[in-house]
Image (cartoon, rainbow, N blue to C red):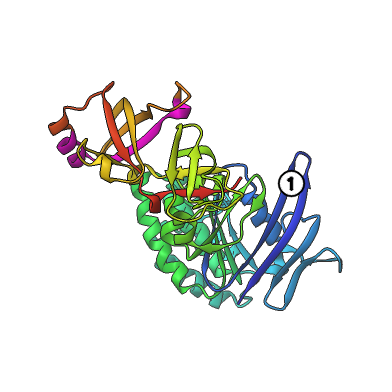
Amino acid sequence: MSLYVDIRKDLGGFRLRVTFEAGQEVMGILGASGCGKSMTLCCIAGVEKPDWGRIVLDKTVWFDSERGINLPPQKRKAGLLFQNYALFPHMTVEQNLMTGLRAAERDQRKARAAAEEMMDRFCLTGLRRHRPPQLSGGQQQRAALARILLARPKVLMLDEPFSALDGYLRWKLEMELMDILGEFDGPTLFVSHNRDEIYRLCHRACVMDHGTSTPPSSVKAVFEKPQTLSACLISGCKNYSEAERDGGEGQGTRLYARDWGVSLDCGERVPKDAAYIGVRSHYIRLVRDGERKELLNSVECRICRIVEDVFHMIVMVRPLSAPFDSDRGQLRLEMPKTLWQEYAGQSQAKEGDTVWIRIAPEDILVLKM
């Protein structure tokens, strides 16, 4: 089963431009708040109408602007789990689940048996008489997802399903959701601004930035080799600088990072459209004075700040060559506490001291606009 989406929608100062295809998999849509993720799901479900484009599930056309086709939501059978779960507040859990069965099962005895089975599966049996205001966030989510699955959707769409939950409950339900999605026979779209959720739950993903989607790729490719600055930032990279090719037409493997004031070897030929350089905080390594001459891309810096996190140390440094005496010219390093204690114990490093760092060529992200 395959879902094809190619749509455009203008909303005043905001333009939605989305193109992707999802098979029987969990495909992530990663993006910041307000980038158009939820609007995309609403257009697929038929809640909103695109201005132009096509939405096709296998050979069934859900929307085609040129042919004037726009199936209503009930004929699309797309299960959409909203952020607030959208349970009917005046109904009990059992009644909410039964609403998901009305269109799929006309036999009331079979409907009740199916609802009973689903309540048992989602650990809701003891809550059948409870109404949504009496449920916790996790219980509401389970009830909403059970209702959607009872309607036998052909496509499952989850819109920030963990955003209202605390950390422990979020992890617990994420593990449960992995099993449920593994059993679902159809495309699943998982929308989130949380990079870790996308990485753990999805097979492929696209990044949305200001209404425009990137071509989907494997989740590992999204995080290990982002192509644009927006994709790099949403994937969690903390360090980036405006950049330009350095070295003319010779070897052509160097980039000059303007904000840091350093030229770095990227290990491979730099494309002409390179506009930024990025490097993840945990890939930057502190080196000792005796090592730096032998290492490519060693940079002399001054320690601006040392911050202790729960499990890591965060060290903010500024290259001595940086033209900006501000956060813009700083680099963020993250390392296990044991590694920092070993380094600081021998060097007595502290805020204001000069240190050397190293950025390996293979850890540099060359980015387009």
Q: Position of residue 284 (x, y in %)?
A: 33, 43
Residue located 50% across and 69% down the image: 115
Identify the residue under disc 1.
Answer: 15
Q: In the image, is 56 to the left or to the right of 362?
A: right
Q: Nearer the viewer, residue 12 or 253?
A: 253
Residue 238 appears anywhere in the view: no
Q: In the image, is 20 to the left or to the right of 288?
A: right
Assess disc 1: are there few (<14), some (14-19) or many (≥20) residues with their C-alpha within 10 Å of its C-alpha.
some
- For residue 309, above or below residue 215: above
Residue located 49% across and 39% down the image: 256
Residue located 54% across and 78% down the image: 110
Q: Residue furthest left?
A: 346
Q: Position of residue 222 (x, y in %)?
A: 49, 57
Q: In the image, is 50 to the left or to the right of 234?
A: right
Residue located 49% across and 44% down the image: 255
Residue 68 appears anywhere in the view: yes
Q: Nearer the viewer, residue 137 or 16?
A: 16
Q: Position of residue 170 (x, y in %)?
A: 39, 50
Q: In the image, is 286 to the left or to the right of 148?
A: left
- Residue 52 occupies quadrant: bottom right
Q: Position of residue 324 (x, y in %)?
A: 48, 23
Q: In what element is the residue under mark 1?
A: strand
Tell whether position 242 is magenta. no
The quadrant in which the C terminus is found is: top right
The quadrant in which the N terminus is found is: bottom right
Kindly identify the amino acid type of the residue bearing the numbered disc 1.
Arg
Tell whether position 339 is magenta. yes
Q: Which span of residues is magenta-colored? A: 327-343
